[in-house]
Image (cartoon, rainbow, N blue to C red):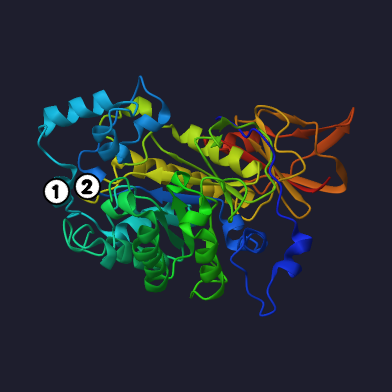
Amino acid sequence: MKRFVRVFTTGLAFLATLLFSSEGKYEPAWESLDSRPTPPWFEDAKFGIFIHWGVYSVPAFAPTEGVNIYARYAEWYWNRTSNPSQEGYSVFKAFHDRVYGPGFKYQDFADRFKAEMFNPEEWAGVFKRSGARYVVLTSKHHDGFCLWPSAESWNWNAVDVGPHRDLAGDLIKAVKATGLKMGFYYSLYEWFNPLYRSDPVRYVDQHMMPQMKDLVVRYEPDLFWTDGEWDRPSRDWRAEEYLAWLFNDSPVGKTVAVNDRWGKETRGLHGGYYTTEYGLVHDKNASGETMRHPWEECRGIGFSFGYNRAETLKDYSTPEKLVHLLVDVVSRGGNLLLDIGPSADGRIPVIMEERLLQIGEWLGANGEAIYGTRPWRIASESENVRFTARGDTVYAILLRRPGPSLVLAEPKPGKGTSVRLLGSNAPLSWTLSGGKMRIEIPVRVLLDLPPAPAYAVKLVGVK
């Protein structure tokens, strides 16, 4: 995958006590807000499920080649069919006119967004079996359509039209019942909201802020994931004011995790954990460095986040690629937020469900090397090996099936070092020669290893 361009560092922790007010509350200023640590549950979770679902799931279309990655996002359908300056406009518009007719409005899709097959308990069961530890649902994307009964979006929400159902409420209840964490994606801006276009200040005051507070008070999410921040600086979004309320006065102030998308200047600098998207930070290619600040990579199983009917098997990542992506991200200190795009009738596409369950099968055997780990002193020593760590235990995760012997240059064993493969109770012998650790894997152990995308070697007592 594309990798990080620079190493980010954490905020200046020694200022935290100075930035707290006398009442022990966070001030509505980045210096104070940035001193709040990301809740430990988020850094321990490592793997989450992103869900893009809404009115755009009805046309469910975007080109799959000949355009940049952003023009492959089906959830941008309304914008791409309405704005001739947008890349991919001609392809989107030609599809729309051919299938629905030039007079068919995007708003008319809302009546076709029925979610009649939606079973939140079934979804939650799939997420649990995938090995994910948290879920993030698009409560409102840039089209402004809400998946909960928002008073500020009358007749443009899933209770007033379409499904006539509180999709967000039903899903968060089902997901939390399985023991997983769940939160909401929320787009700060809306492409075609008349109030936003005519009076952004009133939009923030009378529309956006009430909606964001309603989501938190109504559902008590574990995570709040903002987007669409790039249109304005954070002061225009009143981001610092909102976060101070969220951390100090909301019902989830001590436990909620937030991202860094709070204004066009904030990604990788302010907020909570930092976010990348298809390996991009500030539209720059990412390098392979470890980021010590909590961070999260998001991407789809295919290219699009919302369901795209034009995607075929070649557009979907293989189980091996997805597991390797997870391992690579975690080795560099991040979480993977892997997206699914349900269909308009409320089903998780079969290939997406299959991919999630395949990841879950791997995590069932190797999750010890993923959950609750932190970056080791290096992320990798070759194309084949990634490292994670917990205390004095280091995990060398192999991206190819091991042979009779494994040579590792970086781990430095001591007299009490023990080695074994996860999934096997047999201890492995090792020797140290030329400063390198040589691990012998008996044939009987190799024969018992099932086919898998990756294998984890547990090294206890190495430096």
Which amino acid type corresponds to the residue marked 1 in the rendered image? Arg
Q: Quadrant of the N terminus?
A: top right
The residue under label 2 is 344
Q: Which mark is residue 120?
A: none
Which amino acid type corresponds to the residue marked 2 in the rendered image? Ala
What residue do we see at 62% from left, 35% from top? 4
Q: Are marks 2 and 1 in contact (CB under 8 Å)?
A: yes
Residue 212 drawn at (x, y percent): 40, 64
Q: Quadrant of the C terminus?
A: top right
Residue at the farthest bottom position = 23
Residue 135 drawn at (x, y percent): 43, 56
Mark 2 Cα within 10 Å, few/some/many (few <14, many 20+)?
many
What residue do we see at 39% from left, 64% from top? 205
Q: Is residue 218 visible?
A: yes
Q: In the image, is 306 to the left or to the right of 384?
A: left
The residue under label 1 is 112
Residue 278 drawn at (x, y percent): 49, 35
Q: Could you say which is closer to the camera, residue 137 or residue 9?
A: 9
SS type, badge 1: helix
